[in-house]
Amino acid sequence: MSTTNNTFGVAFYLKKQKTTQAGKSPIYARITVNGKRIEISVKRSIEENNWNATKGMAKGSREETVKLNKYLDQFKAGIIDSYQQLLLQKKFITAELLKEKVTGGDQAEFTLCKLMEYHNSDQGQLLEPGTMKNYYTTQKYIKEFIKERFKTSDKYLSELSYKFITDFEYYLRNRTPEKGQKALNNNGLMKHIERFCKMINLAVRLEWINRNPFHAYQLKFDKVEREYLTKDELARIEAKKFNIVRLQVVQDLFVFSCYTGLAYIDVFNLTPANLIEKSENNIWIATNRQKTNEPVRVPLLPKALAIIEKYKGHPQAIAEGKVLPTLSNQKLNSYLKEIADTCDITKPLTFHIARHTFATTVTLTNGVPIETVSKLLGHSKLTTTQIYAKVVESKLTDDMAQLSKQLQA
């Protein structure tokens, strides 16, 4: 049966078998679609002698009666509107489907909390634990916001709006941090909004929501200068002699990353199978970045190769089947603070600074083309690598000096 031939009707009646001791009977709406009837309570009651059964409305002209009849008119208009929406969506309309549409039952699964749970269980199979930890924090903040702002535990996706997002942003900006936590800075806050946006984009793709409330919203990240070591700072770390074995290992791991550009997790996962010998003393690392699964091919520079040779017989590396002995990222960063103090480096030294140092001091500053650096870092977009290019002011100075000489020649 085509949707254009549907028969449809709405009528109000009293359900007398449910009459209360006060003599009031509940009012129900009877919806008929193609001869099939279904009923919905309108959440209102009235005495039988004040009800016009023929017209399906309250009798009289008292203010109370006028208000009730106006409510019934609006209720009926809502049913008709729901019916017309289903017609426009080219749905096969049944009385049950229309009831679900009117009562919101058709959206019962399309709530914000259900979306977050679906996203986090679905994406949990694909994203890294560190990334998922951030999504769980975003989920926690959204739940807090709904509870505080709306005094409820969930919201239908259809209720979300541009104002909902801006109110959530305001909530995060003014949220009192828990004990031991720092207040969210602008970029940290924007990352939560960005993750929220990604979850809503999933809902749009799944057709759980008709319009995207993020359509007019702009993420506002502050520009951040990437910390990296200068040539002199890197040389100081390389030259320093440590008597404590753990500091020697941390020093070598950090320097290795400075000359390969590998992130902590990719150094941690490095196995002999990732080392490809192209020719004598020409060894490449062939791996995939754990964060993005992008392929990375890095020819080993002499200093990186020397560190691999140094740890060839290391018992921990051999036992774990790794190229280098490893520590947890937390311990590494803790020991790097000791190294920074010893080498008179005031920058907050973390392992990730080694990757930034490779991108700037080791490669771009020495004239390696940005396209090559992008490939070495395993970036999927050149724009990601250009962040590093912006901070290498010394490279700009050298380039302009070289151009000046050429113009004068």
Image: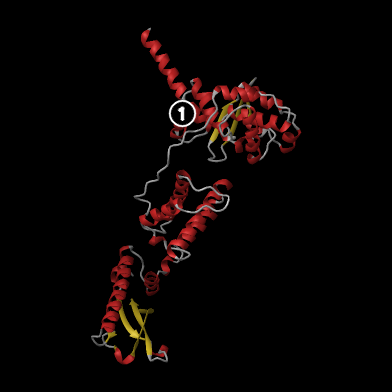
Residue 118 seen in the figure:
no
Foreground of the two, 178 or 117: 178
Q: Residue at x 46, y 62 (%)?
A: 148
x, y percent for residue 210: 36, 58
Q: Which residue is drawn at 52% across and 56% down?
A: 140
Residue placed at 40% from the left, 45% from the top? Answer: 219
Which image quadrant: the N terminus? bottom left
Q: Which amino acid, by three-letter code, is at mark 1?
A: Val
Which residue was labeled with disc 1?
391
Relative to 220, say whether 363 is above or below. above
Marker count (numbered) = 1
SS for tag 1?
helix
Report the front residue among 149 and 25. Answer: 149
When asked about the image quadrant of residue 33, the answer is bottom left
Look at the picture and state if 130 lies above or below 305: below
User: Measuring 63% from the left and 34% from the top, which residue is drawn there?
Assistant: 337
Q: Left or right of 140: which side holds 156?
A: left
Could you tell me which quadrant the C terminus lies in? Answer: top left
Q: Where is residue 158 in the image (x, y as percent from the top left)?
A: 38, 61
Between 169 and 259, the one lying in front of the other is 169
In this view, 244 is above or below 217: above
* Residue 343 can be seen in this image: yes
Q: How crowded is mark 1: few (under 14 residues within 10 Å), some or many (20 or more)?
A: some
Snapshot colouring: secondary structure
Please identify the residue farthest to the left as the structure is shown: 61
Q: Is residue 336 above or below residue 64?
A: above
Residue furthest top as drawn: 409
| Drawn side of residue 264 relative to residue 408, left or right | right
